[in-house]
Amino acid sequence: MMPPICQICKEKFLEKGGLVYFEETEDDKIQNERLRLPGFVGHPPNAFWFCENHFTEAQKLQQLNKNEAFKILNVLFEHDS
Ligand SMILES: [Zn+2]
């Protein structure tokens, strides 16, 4: 797993915030299928950490894929990063 660093502000956080799983893109689907095979380990390509400041908004977008979600999040939090 990737260390818990917020995908928006790149802040490290230890206690608060969380992991958001976005909808899989076609590429994510292929990669996640590979991750389910024995012997493969890795971080799901559609899962991202967010600090407590960004987790709520990110979670609202989890029905979108990461490309769509980050397009929105980057606009929303343009001034935070
Ligand atoms: Zn953050």
Image (cartoon, rainbow, N blue to C red):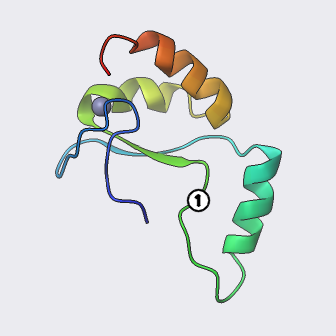
Categorize mark 1 by other alpha carbons within 10 Å: few (<14), some (14-19), many (20+).
some
Q: Residue at x 33, y 40 (%)?
A: 6
Q: Quadrant of residue 42?
A: bottom right
Please give left or right for residue 53 compared with residue 78 in the image.
left
Identify which residue, 46 or 74, lies in the foreground.
74
Rendering coords of residue 15 (x, y %): 17, 50
Rendering coords of residue 75 (x, y %): 49, 11
Assign the N terminus to one quadrant of the image. Answer: bottom left
Q: Residue at x 55, y 16 (%)?
A: 72
Tell how many labels.
Answer: 1
Amino acid type of disc 1?
Pro
Compared to residue 69, the image places residue 41 above or below, namely below
Question: Is any atom of residue 63 visible in this view?
Answer: no
Q: Which residue is mark 1?
A: 44
Compared to residue 66, the image places residue 27 above or below, namely below
Rendering coords of residue 71 (x, y %): 59, 20
Q: Residue at x 46, y 29 (%)?
A: 58
Assign the C terminus to one quadrant of the image. Answer: top left
Q: Residue furthest bottom?
A: 39
* Mark 1 C-beta closer than 8 Å to ligand 1: no
> Ligand 1 is in which quadrant of the figure?
top left
Q: Secondary structure at mark 1?
A: loop
Q: Residue at x 40, y 12 (%)?
A: 78
Q: Quadrant of residue 36?
A: bottom right
Question: Is any atom of residue 29 visible in this view?
Answer: yes
Rendering coords of residue 54 (x, y %): 34, 28
Q: Residue furthest left?
A: 15
Identify which residue, 79 or 13, lies in the foreground.
79
Identify which residue, 1 or 63, lies in the foreground.
1
Please give left or right for residue 57 compared with residue 28 in the image.
left
